[in-house]
Amino acid sequence: MLLFMAETLDLPQRRKLERLYAQYGKKMYAAARRICGDLAEDAVQNAFVSIAKNIEKTDGRDDDGLAGYVIAIAKNEAYDLMRKTEKTEDIDSLPVTDPFSDPAERVFERDAFEAAVKLMRGMDDKYRAPLYLVCVMGMSIKEAASSLRLREKTVGVRVYRAKKLLADKLKEAGYEY
Amino acid sequence: MSIKYSLNDVLIESGVRDFREIAICADWTPTDKHKTKMEKIFNSADGRVSGRLKSILAAAAAAAIIFGVLAAIKPVRDGVASFFSGLFTKPAHTVTDTDTTAQTHVTEPDTAAETTAPDTAADQAGAELPDDARGLIDYMVRNGVSTAAWKKLRECGDGVDVCLDMLKTEEYGTVTCICSAFVSSRLYNELKYGVGWSTATANMAPYLYNELASGDMCPTVYMSECAQHLREYFSENVTTEKLHQDYPVTSKVLSAYGGEYDDVYDPKSKTAAENIRRLCDFKYDEKVHKALLNYEAFEYCAKAYFTETDIKARAVMSVVCAEYIRNRCDDGKASKSSLPLKLLLGEQGYTKLFTCGGEILKMSRVDEEAENYSQWLDAFVSDLKAAAQFWPESVFEAELTELHALLDNAGFTGYRVPPQRDDEIISAINDAISLYNAVSFGAAAEGWCDHETGYRERAEEGTPMTAEMLEHLAPFYTYNGDQPRLYLEEVTLSPSTRGYGEWLGHYCGVLPEDVVRRLLRDTPRFIIIGDSVYLNVFTTEGTEYYHALQGTLGYVSGQDGKIVVTAVVSRRFEEYSYESFELEDGGGALKLVGGTFYEKYLMTDPEKITRTKAAECVYEVLKAYSSLYNGDVSVAASAEECTNSALFADPGYDRFGSGEREYYTGVYTGELALYEYADGGIADLMLSDGGPVSRAYHNGNDVIAIMPGAAEATVNLKQGPIYRISLIEFCDILKIESQTADTVTASLQLEREENGKTTVGTYTFELEMRENNYYGWRAILVGGTFLDLLSK
């Protein structure tokens, strides 16, 4: 698997991967260690395999965007290592309306934005990571599912639930957008 | 503000904040297995990775290991702290040694240690522990503190001696941490289990104090307990005199933790200076206070007051003088004591100083001939003026009438503006900032441009409005004399809900009219078509840089119809700057007419702008010079990341040449201002092979590596290092020799230190104003003697 991944990358892509490792590796390790302890190194390795698969998605991203991405992937790999079996997501309640159909649409006032950031930071990573990949990294559900090693339907549901969770909490707190 | 954010913004921002909060596992050195796997990921199966890249990877791994050792200080310290925290708090198991030496008849809670310090990886791997104390300390520095190593150190007869010896000479954090902890623990047990006073006890005691001062590992309760034991031993075995003479630090421990310990501390034996310092350093002590009320102390305070820089000490001195005069002149009627010193030393020291000042004034009527009194009073009034700026005049009128009269006589009118006007002041400042945001970022104030319900659209070619807009915008998109280049897709317009007349009318009440007219005219963000106004929102990045007043006002002083305010202004979420605002108080609306914010962002005097730009250029060049030659490079994230980044940097890595080298590296945070502020070739010269630094480009950041051998020159201003001087201050320091519309010649006296030799000289700076599409107008260093210096 690892060798296969390497062969699919050209030299600039490999260098980019190396730079990502140099720049974020230690923080990825730190984030992963909190979740899976001694398995953190494995999580980092797996994360890089996953990043390598979608290395072109990192093109044109600034540091802010990449930081969130690599940490999300590392955390996901850490969770993945921790769980024995992936629970099947409840996919009965597929979305009817998407609370944030256009994630680039500027809908938050400053106070709502700050509240949303706070809520997002407290959100379970299993919801947050798919949302990040799909909205910020521009991945398709399929690509995100591949990166996170989840089923497509699971990713779709989690993306929807993450949005809904955020929307509901904001509404509950009295923020309008 | 009508600025809005998207879900993507939320996700990115939350990711960034998370990222910033993740503390790097600095003690993590990748395992061999991990390295192998990562290499497999990086390396191709067909060997296309160049030898150079491999060498980069190898160098990175080496650097990571080196850095790991350096960064291990904190974790090791934490480890030791944790180790001792457990050792001090868990029930101790007493083991009594039979040796007669001071060091070895100590008892230690072995089991506690064993339960709090797991074996290190080296221990688990069966590494053989050194036999001698020095070797064991070295082992723990490298591998962390383990029970086995600690136990063996304890068994070394000369453990304490070696530690004390190393503490005297070593500055390396981990060594001092371990040694200090070891000595403290031995002392603790020696005291706790009653082995009696010894010379070793006294020698070890200072480290109790050090431990506490460093805040690293000794709980306060432990210190108190130790102090208690020490007091007992001292009272039985050591005279007060001997304690003071031979063990001053131990005496300090007892002073800090001893409470009342009459036998040890006798204020009468101290000089006034020592007693003043004692009150300042520790806490209020009635005996010390009384000891200060004598003529010698008064004389000392009256003289020392003028040169003393510590405000707390000055306050103590003022009270000593006041109380001495009062006591001396007391006719029996004013028998109540003046305010006790302990109140003065509290947070509200200034308030008490005022009150004490009133006491002093009362006394002065009957003791105006006291030695040094008039000098002392002048100095006191000067202090009083500085302090009174933070208090409304009404407080003085109602409660501090004596001081009010004194300040009146001194011609002082700069009291704090009544807090009731704070809202009015904040509103005026916010108004001024909102105009700046509108014309700089297209971000209008609430109600002035409804981004939510109003349309936001991209300009389309061919419409009459677009034609007018293009006419307005074209000058802003001209670059290097080329034809205007305007890409309509860069323009996103939001119509203002107010006409141009309303903008002008409102903001002319907030800022001088010429400022407002220029701001509204000279910006690509504010487009006037007829009386309609459109805000050019431009890019998403721009909106994040808007400015906003944060928190409450700081200094709010009013004098001569003007109010001067200091406050914190935020930029882009988490960047803050401390700004001043000078407001004209015409009795009606307040108008911003000066201050740092006004000068930096709003001022209109072309000559002043040119001078400021010139100063900015010289300021940045000097900072760059200092950084690059001195090796004092700001690091964006952590040295570790930068080390790796630099080594991975491509293609700049080649500039360093080949072979093994040492690197100090940093991510570019402005040090390479030479590229932006100095004429082209100079920066290249400095950054070329053999120059003081080398530069590479990596992932959007410039990474520079400084060659240690070349980092040997610094330049300082007479006023101090450049990094301690603000740009506003520097504007006043830089001497403008001549100036035209687009050139400036300035000079500056600099102290230059090279190879340990300092020379003072006046350097000239020839600057040329140039326009850059990205930065706007900027002064560029094109000649002068300082540039010659760079070219050498």
Image (spheres, coloured by chain):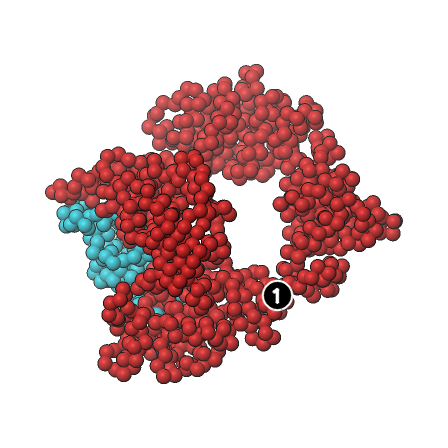
Chain coloured red: which letter?
A: B
Q: Position of residue B249 (x, y in %)?
A: 61, 31
Instruction: Identify which residue, B175 or A173, lies in the foreground.
Output: B175
The amino acid beneath tag 1 is Gly
Tell me what residue is drawn at x 37 percent, y 62 percent. Answer: B742
- In the picture of the structure, the residue carrying the numbered disc 1 is B558
Q: In which quarter of the image is residue B604?
A: bottom left
Tell me what residue is drawn at x 29 percent, y 61 percent. Answer: A136
On screen, residue B171 above or below A136: above
Q: Is residue A122 visible?
A: no
Q: Where is residue B608 in the image (x, y as percent from the top left)?
A: 45, 63
Label 1 marks a residue whose chain is B
On screen, residue B162 above or below B621: above
Chain coloured cyan: which letter?
A: A
| Crowd tier of the residue under label 1, counting other residues whose Cα lies within 10 Å: few below 14, some 14–19, many 20 or above | many
Residue B563 falls left or right of residue A85:
right
On screen, residue B190 above or below B517: above
Residue B597 falls left or right of residue A27:
right
Instruction: Identify which residue, B559 or B82, lies in the foreground.
Output: B559
Q: What element carries label 1?
A: strand
Q: Where is residue B769 in the image (x, y as percent from the top left)?
A: 36, 61
